Amino acid sequence: MSEQRILVTYLTQAKDLQKKAEAIAVGMTVGSWTDLPAAKQADLKPYLGEAVGAQVLDTLENGESRGLITISYPVRNFTADIPSLLTGVFGKLSMDGKIKLIDIQFPEAFLAAFPGPKYGISGIRDRLGAHNRPLLMSIFKSCLGLPFDDLKTQFRAQALGGVDLVKDDEIFFADDRAPFLERIRAFKQIARETEAETGKPVLYAANLTGPVTDLTERAKRAVEAGADCLLFNVLAFGYDALHRLAADPDVQVPIMAHPALAGAYYPSPDYGIGTPLLLGKLMRLAGADLVLFPSPYGNVALNKEEALKLAEHLTEPTGTLRKSFPVPSAGIHPGLVPQLYEDFGLDQVVNAGGGIHGHPGGATAGARAFVAAINAVVAGQTLEDASSESAELSQALQKWGTK
Amino acid sequence: MSEQRILVTYLTQAKDLQKKAEAIAVGMTVGSWTDLPAAKQADLKPYLGEAVGAQVLDTLENGESRGLITISYPVRNFTADIPSLLTGVFGKLSMDGKIKLIDIQFPEAFLAAFPGPKYGISGIRDRLGAHNRPLLMSIFKSCLGLPFDDLKTQFRAQALGGVDLVKDDEIFFADDRAPFLERIRAFKQIARETEAETGKPVLYAANLTGPVTDLTERAKRAVEAGADCLLFNVLAFGYDALHRLAADPDVQVPIMAHPALAGAYYPSPDYGIGTPLLLGKLMRLAGADLVLFPSPYGNVALNKEEALKLAEHLTEPTGTLRKSFPVPSAGIHPGLVPQLYEDFGLDQVVNAGGGIHGHPGGATAGARAFVAAINAVVAGQTLEDASSESAELSQALQKWGTK
């Protein structure tokens, strides 16, 4: 591993970007260099960061350059975990003026030390027997405070419409009216019943919460109770909690990463961590089988280029890591399915909340409208054509249009 | 607890801040309200958020108002942990346009469910027998890749100068040349020797790293090996990891929170989490005995008002929580001690790196210069007067001045 380097790209500004890169390369590794005696330099050389590039993007009014700098760090500086990685390449640097962490490129030996997704796209497709189409997920209209029976009713309605997955709200921590393991058992039973009726399985993603030290144990109990999938607020608990869940051979269940709190990192042009890295590369490395992220549509949306790059990070060949399912979320209705398909292709999960529950015919009809839309795009049919065979799709297009 | 509310303040912008606050209060709790039937409203009322205030700070060019909004959330919506709290008040909201999380006010019953610092300011003072002065901490010049003997030499030099604490570099994860438990044992032995010589104890803060699932166990082994204090990269591992360390009765050692990665959250005026909350309130709640944060001095510094507010959150009466030591860091040299004392008072740790190692007489002299400066300010003496009795302080003032 000693020759292996990790390449890190930052967006920053300085009078001289190359000089800034050189200062960071030293400052983030051995601390000082030119004033070290030769013997000490020889000792520390293997730990020294190196500036490998500086690319000016524009010149600011104050005469400084704004642009990308790339620094290579020896793999030996890190332990194979995301806390070490992020602390080592951005810990104190994050507090040192305008600088944003954009990308990290890993050598294969470093990647190999991470679990990656335990199931990935192919494992989830196998489980559902759904190989040649985008999947469909719906969310509860809300969870917090709702009586258990209401949640059961909602679950059944969504499942009957033909969704592949139903997920909890991410804020569902205080769940005394419908406790975690009881929900898993109850929804599993309903899923059996609806599968008998529709012929389609449905997976329930239960929100995994609790002390970070108990998560593995709680996940195992969830698996024993029949859990299909776990929703996890990765940034609230830290990437390493996901890593350890994914790496544990007894946690036999796919994990769905929720992007809650991601907006505390990515939206500023000057600070934070870029979305493709934050919700793409690092989520896959740490072991998310599915990753939700803001869709590039709607009022408040992710920049489209970033959303596509994020999805690419989740699905492009990366060492021996399995692929993670991209789940572009928010503002999704059936009329957007052709756009989603054009942008994200076959390997995505179409994820809708209001676009299912807000259907004039209710959640079951809302789900059916999406199923019809997905089948149409995969078959190369227009939604208008498909809507002649699906009253639910026709109603949805009337309500939401096709933009 | 059912009547208790958590008050959350955000900085945001909108045409109508009050209306935005009302939309968030519903959207972040029960999801929808006005379209619910009366029976459902009665069911969900106890979980509903409420807009309690909107304060316009200025009017933007686009006609929108920029200002603070405050929303109250029922305590019952949360479990007593920071992942639940942050996901519940800022999870998806963080991705919804320009909005920054500024402050959270907790009812006492909620505070009481958190551990807070196990030792706090008074516990650390007792351990050091140092009650009536700011403490002094130094850091290794660097750690990564350094031969163990070099670290021992550095530790001894700093300890001989009279510092109260010495801490590891936060990037010190890959430590095969000077492994965690061996460092703790070796520095403990050196501390015994220097205490015999100087009469002053010195505490070593070792960087606690490893899988998040193993941290408690590693902390216990550190305590068995004689650890005085643990340095912890809280944001890299997540607040809950700190919470569980602080709450574990077997982890009998103070914890020092490092602010690594904090710059990914706080510097943007529009997004992220405000520093006083991020590094002040939440660190204390989760159990940090000492908290490092960027000092308000030097080139790249924290806004002074925010730094003072942060320190206030660490030390003001807050339920039954012990106080955390503020450790304003970066750019500190002996000439700044009067300013530090004026700004942060008696209950602070003066923390220096370059200001100790860069002393013309070396690290021991550098530490002595700080000791002389601290004794001077506490005695109401000027540094100029004190420097007549301390050659080391005199040299330091010549090198760095008093600004």
Image: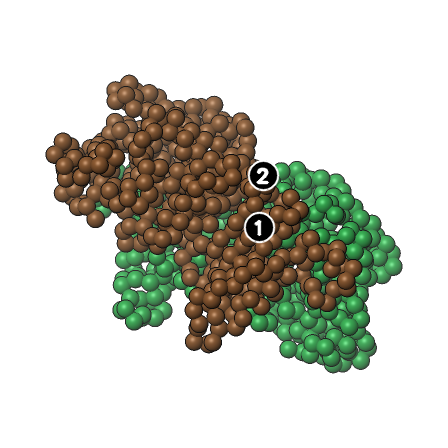
Chain colours: A green, B brown
| Viewer-nearest residue: A3 or B9 | B9
- Left or right: A391, with B243 as reference point: right
Residue situated furthest top in the rendering? B196
Which label sits on residue B113? 2
Residue beneath the point at 67% across and 42% down: A219
| Viewer-nearest residue: A126 or A62 | A62
Q: Nearer the viewer, mark 2 or mark 1?
A: 1
Which label sits on residue B6? 1
Residue B150 x, y percent position in the rendering: 29, 31
Residue A352 x, y percent position in the rendering: 69, 65
Residue B30 x, y percent position in the rendering: 68, 58
Residue A295 x, y percent position in the rendering: 59, 66
Could you tell me how far apart the alpha carbons at marks 2 and 1 are, in whole angstroms? 14 Å
Does the rendering let one see residue A296? no
Pointer 2 with pointer 1, Cβ within 8 A: no
Residue beneath the point at 48% across and 70% down: B65
Q: Identify the element where label 2 is drawn.
A: loop
Image height of A327 relative to B379, above or below: below
Circle 1: residue type: Ile
Marks 2 and 1 on same chain: yes
Residue beneath the point at 71% across and 39% down: A221
Circle 2: residue type: Ala
Neighbour tally class for label 2: few under 14, some 14-19, many 20 plus, Cα within 10 Å: few
Q: Identify the element where label 1 is drawn.
A: strand
- Left or right: A61, with B63 as reference point: left
- Quadrant for the N terminus of chain B in the image: top right
Which label sits on residue A194? none
Q: Which badge, 2 or 1, is on the more N-terminal residue?
A: 1
